[in-house]
Image (cartoon, helix red, strand yellow):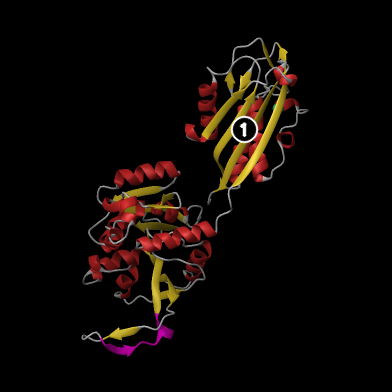
Amino acid sequence: MRASLIIAAGGSGSRFKKSLSSQSARETSPAGKISKLFFPLHGKPLLAHTLAAFQRVPEINETVIAVPLGAEAVVKRLAKEQGWRGIKIVRGGKTRSESVWKALQKTDPKNSWVLVHDGARPFVDRSALDNLFESSKNADAMILARKVVPTIKEAAEDGAVKRTLDRNVLFEAETPQMVKRDLLKRSYGTHPDALNATDESSLVETLGVKVKLVSHEGWNPKITTVKDFELAEAYLQKNETPARHGFGRDTHRLVAKRKMILGGVRIPFEKGPLGHSDGDALLHAVTDAILGAIGAGDIGDWFSDRDPKFKNIASSKILKKVLEGAAKQGWKVLHVDTVIILERPKLGAYKKIIRDNLAKLLQLPQDAVSIKAKTAEGLGPEGEGLAVTCEALVNMKKVSI
Ligand code: MG
C-alpha cells in the first residue's frame, strides 16, 4: 500500500488567536500574527511535532502541506532545518476543505490512498496508524475516532435541553482520515458544499461510501487554544528522559616532534601530545564526557589504541563517530564546559578559535561551548610543562526521534 499524506495546515487558527488575546500568554508570545502551527511546543514549532509523527512511516511516501497564505517561506525554512524529506508545499485555501482540495491536486496519482491529517494533532502514534492501515484491507474510507465519554445534550432553540443523546453510538472524529484517492477526488464534485465540509469523511459520505470508524488507545488531541498548548507541553515533559551530565578527563604527555592540537586546532609550539591518535586531549575529554552521559563506556572501548587503523587518526573523527552513535539513540549535546590545564604556550589568543571549532564539531551555538584555560602554577606534570590535561562536562538531552 502506498499513500500520500496531506497535512491541513492552512487555517487561520482563529480560536487560538482568540485564546491568546484572552490570556497573559499574549505578552510572552509573538504569535499574535502567525498561525498556531508555528507556535513553539517543547522547543520546536507545533507543525514540526506533527510531521515528526509521520517520519519513518514506510506506507507514506510523500507529504503535501497546505500552508496559510504568506507562510510558504517559513515552512520551507522549517523543512530544511528539521531535515524533512519528500515534502511538497501548497498554498492553502480559504477553508480547510479548499486547502485539502488544493493539496490533493499535488499528490502522486500513483498512490491509491490519501491520508488527511490536521497540522495541529502532533501526538498521533504508530499504533493508531497501524489500526488505520489494517482496516484499509476491507474498507475504502476510514477515520480515526474516539468513543464519546461525556454525556452529550442536544440543545433546543431556547437553550434548554431538548434531549440526551445515546453516547454509546457517538464518536468524535479525529484525523488522519484515510480515503481512496479517486473517491476523495470524486466526492469534491458530488458534495453540494464541498469547500465548506469540515472533514473528508463528510465528503465521501455523500457518495454513499461506508466510512469505517477506527478507534485507538493513544491520545490524539487537536491543539486549539493556549490551554491546549500548556497541556501538550506538560505531556511532553512528563514523557521526557531527564537531561544527563557526563564528565571526561584526559592527559597526554608533551614531547618534541609532535604537533600541538587542542579542540581540533593546531597551535604553534615546540612540543605536542604523545598519543596513538593525534593526541587531542580536549576532544578526548569531550568524547569521554559524551560517552559517560549516555552510558556507553569510554573512548578506549570504541577506539582501541592498539588498533593500527586508528594510528594518528584525527580526534575530530573520533568525536564525530561517537556523536553519531549518541544521535542514533536520540541523544543530543546541549552544552559543554571545558578546562584546559597547560603551562605553555599561553592559550589566550586561541581560546576563541578553539571554542568556535568545538562548537562547529558539536553543531552547537558558540555560547553553548565554553573553553577555560589554566596554568598549574608550575606544579605537577602540567605545571612543569610535561603534560596537558583537559576536563569536560557535557549536558545531554534525549530528543524525540
Ligand atoms: Mg587521550
In the drawing, does residue 201 fall left or right of residue 69?
A: right
Q: Which residues are magenta?
A: 160-170
Residue 375 quadrant? top right
| Percent position of residue 380, x then y | 75, 21
Q: Secondary structure at mark 1?
A: helix
In the drawing, does residue 193 fall left or right of residue 141?
A: left
Residue in the image at 66% along x and 38% along y: 247
In the drawing, does residue 8 fall left or right of residue 395?
A: left
| Percent position of residue 150, x then y | 41, 80
**Taking the image as drawn, is residue 115 in sight?**
no
Amino acid beneath label 1: Leu
Most foreground residue, 336 or 8: 336
Residue in the image at 31% along x and 73% along y: 202
Find disc 1 in the rendering and name its residue: 319
In the displayed image of the protein, which residue is found farthest to the right? 306
Residue in the image at 60% along x and 31% along y: 338
Most foreground residue, 291 or 127: 291
The stretch drawn in magenta includes residue 167: yes
